Image (spheres, coloured by chain):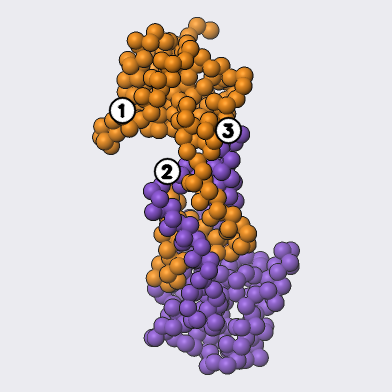
Chain colours: A purple, B orange
Amino acid sequence: MSHLAAPLARLVENLQRLPGIGQKSAQRLAFHILNMPKKDADELTQAIIEAREKIHECSVCCNLTEHELCPICRADGRDKTTICVVEDARDVIALERTREYNGLYHVLHGTISPMDGIGPEQLRIKQLLTRVAENDISEVIMATNPTVEGDATALYISKLLSPFGVRVTRLAYGIPVGGDLEYADEVTLRRSLEGRSQI
Amino acid sequence: MSHLAAPLARLVENLQRLPGIGQKSAQRLAFHILNMPKKDADELTQAIIEAREKIHECSVCCNLTEHELCPICRADGRDKTTICVVEDARDVIALERTREYNGLYHVLHGTISPMDGIGPEQLRIKQLLTRVAENDISEVIMATNPTVEGDATALYISKLLSPFGVRVTRLAYGIPVGGDLEYADEVTLRRSLEGRSQI
């Protein structure tokens, strides 16, 4: 790096801090950014600045949006009695891609993780309880990740929800479609056996 | 993408235009950028803007630099009679990493490529000829890439240099160290045979 001009080295360093960007790709990106047409480079920096300025949490579901309400909370024709609880906004995108779910979401922005100093109060759990209390909700689907933290968070929230008499469900565990039994880990296989259904 | 807020979608789009960044990584990067501390995000955009403003070509070797001369042209103790000709500034970094070469460089900023409409006049060939004419240069090492364009460019330049009576050499071709003969392509193997040396 010693033979990189200082402003270039600084750019490489900053790019390298991004997730999944190693030294080589940071360098490649930096040189690409240097050689970009001015218009494209301006658009890139502007996009970063604007996204950070304009994007905030939806006042209902805490999904990311530039408006008061996110497009899903604003949409007509969605089932407003079902809430799917996810860890972060990317999970909303993943679930929307399935075209299977037509209810609303609630984005927690993390999971309970004492090791990382994240307790329930750092998540959007209070907002979820308020939503369930104030609206006519029939089902809350816990769609946190199938990890220790995701499971613990789902369990914690389901306990908080029990006084409301709402149905709380959890996404099914199992072997991924197109996957290979041979390569499935034993915990997944065990869960997949437990959750077996009649053909 | 339809459920991404517009400023976020715009950021993803801009990131996706960068080399090696697909849709999924663009999305991952965009969310990361949104969640970054303000200080880091400001530093990133500032680094992009500054690198583009301050970096230009060294007035001697056309390497990228923020000063009149690049660090290598400025350095004492380098062999100023040898010039290594490379396609772009990243090749300088790669060669410097070897700690083997102690001469100067000349960065062409591309190769002759009629298919892409790049002729000799778009490269920094004239500057190279001036350097060789005006300085006491004993050897020019052609270190363009081992591709059709790289070879053609090396050959073209070596012809232009012949009136100067300077020694023109080319990097050795051969099988990569640690590579496997079985997987080497036949052209590389043939070059490696041609270039064999006595043990």
- In the image, is residue B193 above or below residue B28? above
- Going 53% across and 66% down the picture, which residue do you hit? A52
- Residue beneath disc 2: A35
- In the image, is residue B33 above or below residue A77? above
Checking the image for residue B120, the label placed there is 1
Q: How far apart are marks 1 and 2 (CA)?
A: 19 Å
Q: Which of A80 and B96 is in front in this view?
A: B96
- In the image, is residue A167 above or below residue B83? below
- Residue beneath disc 3: A3
Q: Where is residue B152 drawn, in percent x and y?
A: 32, 23
Checking the image for residue B48, the label placed there is none
Q: Residues within 10 Å of mark 1 (few under 14, many from 20)?
A: some
Chain name for mark 1: B
SS category of the residue bearing label 3: loop
SS category of the residue bearing label 2: helix
- Going 44% across and 16% down the picture, which residue do you hit? B134
Chain name for mark 3: A
Q: Distance between the residues labelled 1 and 3?
A: 27 Å
Q: Which of A36 and A157 is in front in this view?
A: A36
Q: Quadrant of residue A96?
A: bottom left
